[in-house]
Amino acid sequence: MTLVTYFFQGEPGESLTRPNAFLLPGHPSPSSRVVTLGQFLESFPTSANARGGRLHFRFRAEDAKLGYVWQDISIPTAILPTYNGQITAKVLCLDAKIAAQRVARLRRKHNMDYGAEEALQASSSSSTSRVPGAPSSSSSSSSTAQTKASACVSQAAPQDLMDFDMMGGGEDVGPSPRTSSVSSTPAVSDFATMSALDIDSSSGSGGAASTTAGGKQLKREELVARREAAIQEKVNQALEFKQELDENQKREGEELEAAKLKHDKILTEWAFDQSKKKRNVRTLLTTMHKVLWPDNSWKAIGLGDVIEPKKVKLQFRKAMLVVHPDRCNTMSAENRFIGKRIFEGINDSYQEFLKSEQPDG
């Protein structure tokens, strides 16, 4: 029995260093017999998928340059890679919803340098210590201090008014002590009005907080639901694209396998004689029309067209324009298989021809 390790990507407490494990019956060790994805899924514990969603698996594989890489495998007959003789899987739950507390929320942030704070303190102290009937110099100094404080605030406030905060626990973060006294400055309120996603974090009533977007009041739950719906739509689109890609690859493999069963014997007899020796390039060029697909652009030639070495070179180039892989990449899988085999046979024989005969020009 083989010990197989796995962990769920993005789940709390799950990581490559703290994996789960289960036994794969019937296999003494991963190296003694290949293990397919279908065999892996038959033994994968159903209790591990507590959410009941669709799962996608990635397997750890050795890499000469990077040490190891993760391979996406979704075809049941595909052979699983190993790393240090061990099968390790990374599991992604495709139907998992994004937790509300992990949604990025906007947090107000008001900056004020120490000069502005000192000016406000001076303004406050001067206004409270003025004695009735005293000269108006105190009033003018207070007005000057307030003007200085307002100038400092207007210069400092726009620099870093807000930032995104990933709230792991869903707690509101209020303004810092130094910034609470200027939370209603004109620069801050104007900027907050311009923001389409300005969430009021001063309310501690959870879902009672709202945001202004296009003049319409939206509750926080509605914003979270909209964001989750948008994320889920993107996940569904990516899943559909991957399923379509897997289906195309599967269909391509089936078509190539059918083409091999149909044409492999004929193409082998065309390229090799009964003693398994490669036929010369002149023979292959003059018989190529017998193994090509129907409705091709190749015109059959005779031995008289390839007697001279320079004519062999000319006909070889014409053949390459028909069967070269770059010319066949838009054709059906069957035609691509035929073209690939003819290209390999003629090209190998032509290289042998160049060793014995050198065409002029």
Image (tube, rainbow, N blue to C red):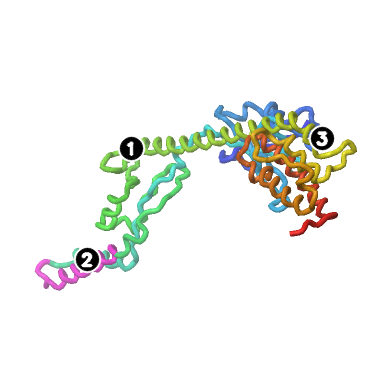
User: Could you tell me how far apart the alpha carbons at marks 3 and 1 are, in whole angstroms?
Assistant: 75 Å
Secondary structure of the residue carrying numbered label 3? helix
**Which of marks 2 and 1 precedes in the sequence?**
2
**Quadrant position of the C terminus in the picture:** bottom right
Q: Nearer the viewer, residue 239 or 198?
A: 239
User: Could you tell me how far apart the alpha carbons at marks 3 and 2 are, in whole angstroms?
Assistant: 99 Å
Q: Amino acid at mark 2?
A: Gln
Residue 31 in the figure: left or right of residue 336: right
Secondary structure of the residue carrying numbered label 2? helix
Q: Residues within 10 Å of mark 3 (few under 14, many from 20)?
A: few
Please report contact status of discs 3 and 1: CB closer than 8 Å, yes or no: no
Name the magenta segment's main secondary structure: helix
Q: In the rendering, at what x and y percent does residue 196 appear?
A: 32, 47
Which residue is tagged 3? 269
Magenta region, residue range: 132-154
Q: Residues within 10 Å of mark 2 (few under 14, many from 20)?
A: some
Q: Nearer the viewer, mark 1 or mark 2?
A: 1
Secondary structure of the residue carrying numbered label 1? strand
Which residue is tagged 1? 219
Whether residue 7 appears in this view of the structure is no
Q: In the rendering, at what x and y percent does residue 219 appear?
A: 33, 37
* Residue at x 76%, y 28% (from the top left corner): 25
Which residue is tagged 2? 146
Q: Amino acid at mark 1?
A: Lys
Quarter of the image for residue 133 reads: bottom left
Q: Is residue 206 above or below residue 113?
A: above
Residue 85 in the figure: left or right of residue 90: right
Q: Is residue 151 within the magenta segment?
A: yes
